[in-house]
Amino acid sequence: GENVEQHPSTLSVQEGDSAVIKCTYSDSASNYFPWYKQELGKGPQLIIDIRSNVGEKKDQRIAVTLNKTAKHFSLHITETQPEDSAVYFCAASRRNSWGKLQFGAGTQVVVTP
Amino acid sequence: EAGVAQSPRYKIIEKRQSVAFWCNPISGHATLYWYQQILGQGPKLLIQFQNNGVVDDSQLPKDRFSAERLKGVDSTLKIQPAKLEDSAVYLCASSLLSGSSYEQYFGPGTRLTVT
């Protein structure tokens, strides 16, 4: 089955700096890669996703890049703000079972003012 | 639009007891998921429903876990009997059956502590 590894497990950044989280996956049939943000006491919330026919996608301060050859994808957050502090999860799923997400272990991001 | 509702929010039980969690998805969402999230880990899919049918339950420990979605709307997840290792947050999520959006909407979860 699919295995998703996520690094780093914790990330501390100064407000205004950039944050980068990296994930690798094992299943070459995976073609959907979402990123979820989880705040304390809440369920995860989708912040951005990418499908395998696209190499990069941006949404304001957030961007995701995908390298299918190397089987890795990354989340980039620019101009970080204190409200970006949360746990971020990457995930992957296959075309014919897009609902079956395999999540990474998560990255605790702390943005210090 | 109301989000995914779950109850209870917290539950403490002793091992070998039984427990049930309830989930009401976003109105109109045909797909419903139950996840187990152990502290410090990502969510792990337990079961996926499409309307009232099971799509995937390959990671559900069927000797002790059961789930149902009888009328294709709300759902119940049961554990009987509970073990210490079942301590986790149980998340419910729902999504539209749509090729244009794969987004899963998560509820706040039920935190289960087994003592």
Image (cartoon, grey):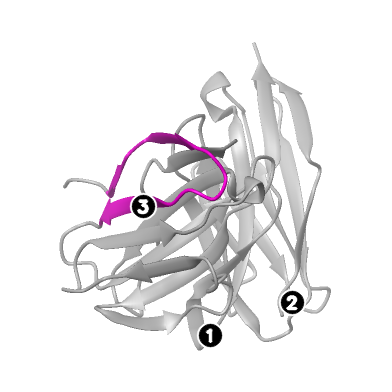
Q: Which residues are magenta?
A: B4-24
Residue at 71%, 51% (x, y): give it: A105
In the depicted structure, whether residue A2 falls above or below residue A59: below
Residue at 51%, 33% (x, y): give it: A39
In the depicted structure, whether residue A31 falls above or below residue A37: below
Q: Which mark is residue A68?
A: 2
Question: Is residue A45 visible in the rendered structure shown here?
Answer: no
Question: Is residue B108 visible in the rendered structure shown here?
Answer: yes
Check disc 2 and report its element: helix, strand or loop.
loop
Q: Nearer the viewer, mark 2 or mark 3?
A: 3
Magenta run includes residue A41: no
User: Front-most of B81 and A47?
Assistant: B81
The amino acid beneath tag 2 is Lys
The residues bearing labels 2 and 3 have C-alpha atoms spaced at a distance of: 41 Å
Q: Pointer 1: what residue? A: A95
Chain to which the residue tagged by mark 3 belongs: B
The amino acid beneath tag 3 is Ala
Residue at 47%, 49% (x, y): give it: B90
Q: Which mark is residue B20?
A: 3
Q: Position of residue A101 (x, y in %)?
A: 56, 68
The residues bearing labels 3 and 1 have C-alpha atoms spaced at a distance of: 32 Å
Q: Position of residue B55 (x, y in %)?
A: 41, 83
Check disc 3 and report its element: helix, strand or loop.
strand
The residues bearing labels 1 and 2 have C-alpha atoms spaced at a distance of: 14 Å
The amino acid beneath tag 1 is Arg
